[in-house]
Amino acid sequence: MIIIYPICEFIPIYHKEHITILNRNYSANYRRLQYGMLAFRSIWDVLLFLRASSTDQNLNAFRSRLPVEQAFDLLYETATENDPWSVQTTRSRYQERKYADLLKMLPKRKYQNALDIGCGTGFLTEGIAQMAEKVLGIDISVSAITHAAARLAHHSNLEWSQGNVTDLDVIGDRTFDLAVIADTIYYLDRPISDTTLDMISDKVASLLERGGILLLANHYFFFPNADTRLTNRIHNAFKRCNSLELKREYRRAFYKVSIFEKAP
Ligand SMILES: C[S@@+](CC[C@H](N)C(=O)[O-])C[C@H]1O[C@@H](n2cnc3c(N)ncnc32)[C@H](O)[C@@H]1O
């Protein structure tokens, strides 16, 4: 079953019937997986996942010979349309649906100051900007934020800065009533220690105002592979943070989201 699962995960359409049979007889994981299959609504959605996997391979190759900032810059510079994770493709609607879902998970408020850590070229940041007076997007890649700033120059409430989630001193003493960290911590150099994760969660919590909201999202595969285990460790570090209270948790195909509130 462990071998069948990853195969099915990437060619779901052809294996759906087979999964259904396994589902009835074996494990709840397959039921969740079958639900996950709804994420693939077209062949373009499947291709998106294949492309993401090749992006991760390119990134690993760049990281093996360059400092991490330059590796992400090169990834953005060499990707088709400077979009390594295909977030702006209109053929696959997966990313668009994911961003819409993430924004729906946030408590409905008019936020004053929002922070998007690991903002990339700003597609999610743009959605956050609809809910907030001001948004600061931070990314390790100068290339990513340069593209974000150019693409979204017409939004006067967006600001961009180069920075690393492991060293957020670039933010100074500003505080926020909303912070979003989507698929960012996951990309730190591995292995990632619990000490590093605790340091990040404490720092992010210190940037939040009392009652402020944190949305944390990371890859999730309904099965305890290495990526899912890392995601669980990241989310657990934020759960350990004394000043953050977990309000909601969602498992979707193929990401996990935790919504925290800073103690009032
Ligand atoms: C998969 S993309 C996610 C982009 C955006 N959050 C989204 O959901 O569309 C990961 C982003 O994290 C950035 N990143 C990776 N490591 C980072 C770090 N240590 N600090 C800040 N940003 C980082 C990358 O440059 C990249 O733009």
Image (cartoon, helix red, strand yellow):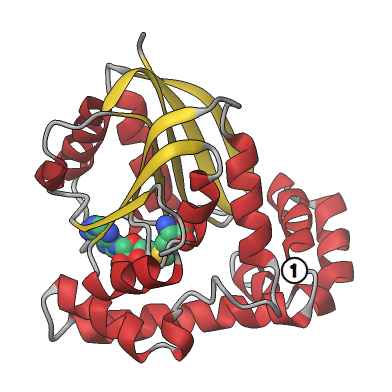
Position in image of residue 13 (x %, y %): 82, 75
Task: Tell me what residue is drawn at x 83 percent, y 79 percent.
Answer: 14
Q: Is the CB of the residue bearing disc 1 within 8 angstroms of ligand 1?
A: no
Q: Quadrant of ligand 1?
A: bottom left
Instruction: Inspect the image, locate mark 1, and give the three-letter code of the amino acid beneath it.
Output: Phe
Residue 136 seen from this side: yes
Residue 20's image quarter?
A: bottom right
Name the residue nearer the viewer: 58 or 93: 93
Position in image of residue 157 (x %, y %): 40, 47
Residue 225 seen from this side: no
Name the residue nearer the viewer: 199 or 94: 94
Placement of the N terminus among the 4 image quadrants: bottom right
Side of 41 relative to 164 (left or right)? right
Position in image of residue 36 (x %, y %): 72, 57
**Secondary structure category for the residue under label 1:** loop
How many numbered marks appear? 1
Position in image of residue 263 (x %, y %): 35, 12
Side of 95 relative to 134 (left or right)? right
User: On the image, numbered disc 1 is attached to which residue?
Assistant: 40
Rate crowding at label 1 as few (under 14), some (14 to 19) or many (20 or more) other CA atoms within 10 Å: many
Name the residue nearer the viewer: 69 or 222: 69
